[in-house]
Amino acid sequence: MEREELDLLLDGARRWFAEHAPLSERVARFRQGHSAPVGSWDALADLGWLALPLLEEADGFGAPAGACFELLRLAGRDARPEALDLHLLLAPLLVQLAPELAAPLSAGTLRLAMADLQPGAEGPRWNAEQLSGRTGALLGVEHATHALLPLASGGLALLELAAAGVSHEPARWVDGRATARLQLDRVSARHWPGQAGQAIDRAAAALVADATGVFEAAFELTLDYLKQRMQFGKPLSANQALQHRMAEIFCDLQQALALTERLAQEIDAEAAGPWPTLPVAKSFVGRRVLRGVGALIQVTGGIAVTEEYRLTHWYRRLHVNAQCFGAAEAQLNRIEVRRQLLAA
Amino acid sequence: MSLFNTSELRRFREEVRDFLQTHLSEELRHETRGGLHMAREDMARWQAILHRRGWGAPHWPQALGGTGWTALQRYIFEEESAFADAPLGDVHGLFLAGPMLIAEGSDAQKARYLPRILAGEEFWCQGFSEPNAGSDLASLKTRARFDGTHWVIDGQKTWLSSGHHADLMFCLARTEPEAKPQAGLSVFILDMRDPGITLQPILTMDEGHSVNAVFFDNVRVPADAMIGAPNKGWGYAKDLLARERVNNAQAPRTKRDIVELDRLARECRGVDGRPLIEQAGVRRKLAVLTADFVALESAALSVIAEQMRGKEPGPAASTLKIRGSELQQRVSETAMALLGDAGLVLGADYGSGLLHPAGRGWAERHFFRRVVTIYAGANEIQKTIIAKSILDM
């Protein structure tokens, strides 16, 4: 994919996000008592975005992870309700496992939700070609037709949400997006052994890219606000305490952007993983990005803790990104001091 | 990382590694790992070896002794040098005076000074800060007046790192007292043996001698000792400090240190007699340092990638000094924590049996490193630079 092509696509995405249920509009809806964020999944297929990460032989565009990440950063900036993040990173894996899934994935008729691994005996088990048990909370359930489930056995299962034996326990994430846990009673599903780890890391990578977009947008909004808001007869941005705080958060933002870029390079170089930067980048979201946006709320002041302000929604979304598919402590547990991790 | 992962770069890394393996003596490695302030002879010896290989100043233009390597190759070279425990050499000559002479010096100055920096024959120091002009450098008072044939310099400087090793100093002095503070400064080359120069050691918190104060009493230097144009010194100094900041991120050496911390955690034992690395808290601490290092390194490599695409270092470069220096301090704090009471001895007590052998040099590094967030423009100054010139606050 050429840079020019990508820039055109990103320009289009910016416009489309602004015209179709942008965050500002959704915030207004929250305030009128509509709890569900609206989204427009079907249109994504028409725009061609769903085929973006698929290889050309699967009628895709063969876009590298870096290009998908740029689109996801835009989606994060607007806190999009469509689970484009899961799709862009998981679709290539699914098509590799089952090439016939390329067509429904590209057409948007197979839409993914995904749950994290459930510890021990609690999670669903694959037995006699069927799946039984209780899943974790699904991300992306809003518009999904299918659930992708990593299993404790290391296997990966794909099932239809409307299949016989599936019952839903719906709930909402802190950022307003729908979620659900599934109770599965001998549900027919597709199953691939040994793919759980890669699927989880792909989902985690998607959330890193989204979180970086959230961080960028939150930083820009705050910087603008500080330059406009007058207190003590001068703009807030004229105070050195706030200048230094913003400079510190800027350091974290630069690092978040650099880690995201590096992770994309690793995914492109070695599609099957492991990607040494993943646990670093994902733990960075839970440790530094979350704290960074918390600090942006602090320097903004009271308005930033109101339900009508966008920072509120970004901050809540970051909690979902930070906790799902390997929270900071779990990711730190995976990091060992090795020269290889640290170098080439 | 895929940026490094080409067969060409892997070959390059092997070539550097082989060279270091062959030419770097065990004695020099030992001195570098343990010694915070290296002896001049040791640094000069290694510089001469590098110079003979043509690697004396990789970042200089090829025509003047540089290697013609890409920014990424230079990073690999620094990383391999760090992991081999190779001495740093004369950073003031190689990274500060050299590039300033290359940018602003006359042909005669380049011909006179650059080859000797390359060969490790002459060492430099930086005469910038004064007792009343630290972060506020432009308020410096050292005067240089022209007496018809010579510049005559009076005043004093402080924080001269390696001043006692140096043959030469580049010195920022006021040549136009009536002008605005930034407008009337010029840069001079001083021979440290010139009459009227008195050097006074300053001992630092680590009990080491690496910095000095210097006094100028009617020091006479010839007219051609000025670098560049008169009264343009502030601009040259700002360029120099910007170069210094990127260098001060010290990512490759910090990477080496973190691997060394891992060794400490495996070799030092807790009160239960088990290696410290078996404690979850210790493992977490090392994981956090590693993660924060990878974040710093990624930002540094982004800058390098931009340089290789022909773009000047973007805003990320300004953040490197802050995060790099903070990380250096956290690394040495962690070393002290791992060593416990065995870490509480300074150089003179090496070998007394109290210090764990792997802990050599850490107490000195730890105490001296309080300086890294202060020097080269304190981190508070860096934050103001970011706020003003990048964030437009």
Image (cartoon, coloured by chain):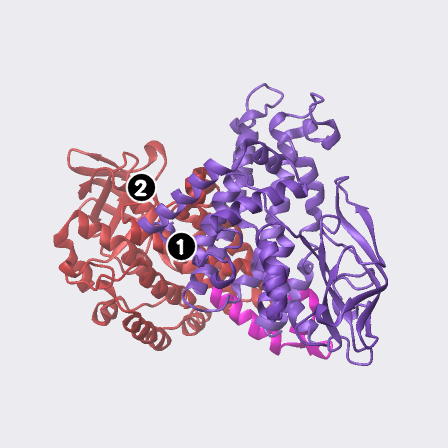
Quick check: B205 left or right of A105?
right
Contact between marks 1 and 2 (CB within 8 A): the answer is no
- The answer to which of A147 and B3 lies nearer the viewer is B3
Identify the mark at residue A90; answer none if there is no mark: none
- The answer to which of A136 and B324 lies nearer the viewer is B324
B77 is higher (above) or lower (below) than A211: above
Counting the numbered discs, the total is 2
Q: Which residue bears the numbered disc 1? A: A262
Give x and y (percent) for residue A42: 23, 68
Quick check: A324 left or right of B99?
left
* Chain letter of the residue carrying label 1: A
Q: Label 2 crowding class (10 Å Cα cut-off): few <14, some 14-19, many 20+? A: some
Q: Mark 1, mark 2: which one is toward the viewer?
A: 1
Occupied quadrant, residue B379: bottom right
Which region of the structure is painted magenta? Answer: A216-245
Q: Which residue bears the numbered disc 2? A: A197
Give x and y (percent) for residue B251: 53, 49
B251 is higher (above) or lower (below) than B96: above
Residue type at mark 1: give it: Arg
Is residue A238 visible in the rendered structure shown here? yes
Quick check: B8 left or right of B343?
left
Indicate the secondary structure of the residue bearing disc 1: helix
Specify whether disc 1 shares its chain with disc 2: yes
The chain in red: A
- The answer to which of B127 and B102 lies nearer the viewer is B102
The chain in purple: B
Q: Residue at x 47, y 61 (%)?
A: B62
Earlier in the chain: of badge 1 and badge 2, it is: 2
Magenta stretch, overall SS: helix
